[in-house]
Amino acid sequence: MGSHGHSHKRASDLDSSWIDPEKETRLHKVLLAILLPLTFLGVFTIFVSWPGSNLQIDKGIFGYVEQSEFFTVEVQTIEKYDCISNGATQDASGNFSTSQCAHISAKLLTGPNAGEIAKFDVEPTIVDFGIHSGDKVSVASIPIETGNDYIFNDFERTNGIYVLFAVFLIILFLTAGFGGLRALLGLVITFGLLIVYLIPSLIQGQQVVYVVGGVVLAITALVLYLVHGFSLKTGAAIVGTLCGSAIAMIGALWSTDALRLTGITGDEDLVLSAVASQVKLSNLLIASMVIAGFGALNDVTVTQSSAVWELASANEKQTWRQLFFGGMRIGRDHIASSIYTIAFAYVGSALVTLMLIVAASPPLARLINDEVVAQELALIMVGSIALALSTPITTACAAWFAVKIAKSEAAPAT
């Protein structure tokens, strides 16, 4: 199949001379009659299950009280000393191993006491990493009877994040134009909904299928139309993404139950249970399987739909079968690369924990039985199954749309 000179065009300049605009509009209206109610169902679900303002979180476990405030300080002097830290070992005579802690004097840069000196200690992990005079760090100020007690919180990295974001915006605009900025807006909408609705709802222990399903239904059509344009081609990708998300949800529900995954794989999980007692950690695992696969699903479905449109524009006299199998030849490569993406993303996020497990050198059967490893394997496999199945679904849908909207004189004889 030749490309008939389309290769020099950008994707946004895709030849649409083979499309009958009236047929496309009519079919798109039928699709919207399905997608709009689904989107409104998602919005309605979010509206009726919006979490209350009282999340019943016990912040005391974080180690600071409600009255504490955070300020930026500039390190002035560092005085190292020997201390017994977490993970210290004991020798035969009963002496504990020591590490290097440090007394820090720093000048307050923000707050009502700016210019004054704050004194606090830092743990060996911070000393080993490196803390120097002139460094800007964040401290928590806790009111006590004699004034304020300062505790090291973290390195100050806000300005660095702003600089990185500015560079990101510039490069995104230069390489992707306004399409890149629309993608960023879609990301802001999605992450905003996760932060203000999904996470608080899960903290309150709401039904995971209800909450995650509401978010997926509400944002899929909105975000994909916003980022990739209001067209039937995007509509085919939306159908594939919704189907893939449903498959991911079914796979997540089955795997967490069948594999008896508790969702407890580290100290953070136990802390979260203590902070928010209503949280069901297995529900968080189910939500993470669906949400993590959502981005990869978007990528695969949009690419598949575009591939079918390219094939249809390259040779208008193709049947549904020819478009489907032509699209799947492209799709197979994309499935393989996307599975790599998912696998490395998950392994990268749990690398430290996996390194500790592998360092213990357990037998293979014990290794894959460990909840951390089993959880990562389940995440990879459920995400990959959703990707693999959403590819033929999207391709079939896009091919059917393409055949239906082709101009009559270009349509294949039946």
Image (tube, grey):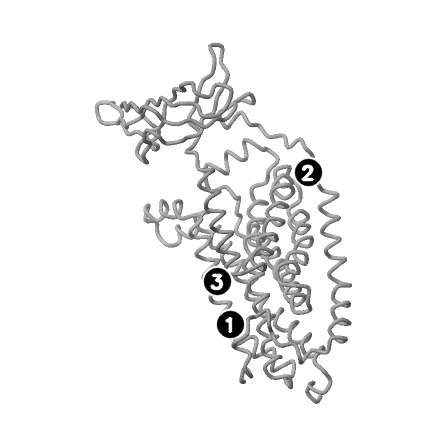
- Of the numbered discs 1 and 3, the one sitting upstream in the chain is 1
Query: Around disc 1, counting alpha carbons within 10 Å, would you say few (fewer than 14), some (14 to 19), or many (20 or more)?
Result: some
Q: Which mark is residue 332?
A: 1
- Label 1 sits on what residue type? Arg
Q: Amino acid at mark 2?
A: Pro
Q: Which residue is mark 2?
A: 51
Q: In the picture provided, is 278 more to the left or to the right than 107?
A: right
The quadrant of the picture occupied by the C terminus is bottom right
Left or right: 121, with 64 as reference point: left
Q: CA distance from mark 2 to mark 3?
A: 34 Å
Q: Spot the residue most to the bottom.
A: 413
Badge 2: how crowded within 10 Å, few (<14), some, or many (20+)? some
Image coords of residue 115 (percent x, y): 43, 20
The residue identified by callout 3 is 339
Kindly give the residue lying farthest to the left in the view shown: 93
Mark 1 or mark 2, earlier in chain: 2
**Which residue corresponds to the image point at 41% horizontal and 20% vertical from the top-left?**
118
Question: How many other residues sit within 10 Å of disc 3, few (<14), some (14-19) or many (≥20)?
Answer: some
- Discs 2, 3 touching: Cβ within 8 Å: no
Type of residue at label 3?
Ile
What separation in Å lies between label 1 and label 2 (alpha carbons)? 41 Å
- In which image quadrant can residue 152 be found? top left
Q: Residue at 34% across / 33% down in the picture?
A: 125
Which SS class for mark 2? loop
Q: Residue at x 59, y 45 (%)?
A: 283
Q: Position of residue 48 (x, y in %)?
A: 75, 43
- Tag 1 secondary structure: helix
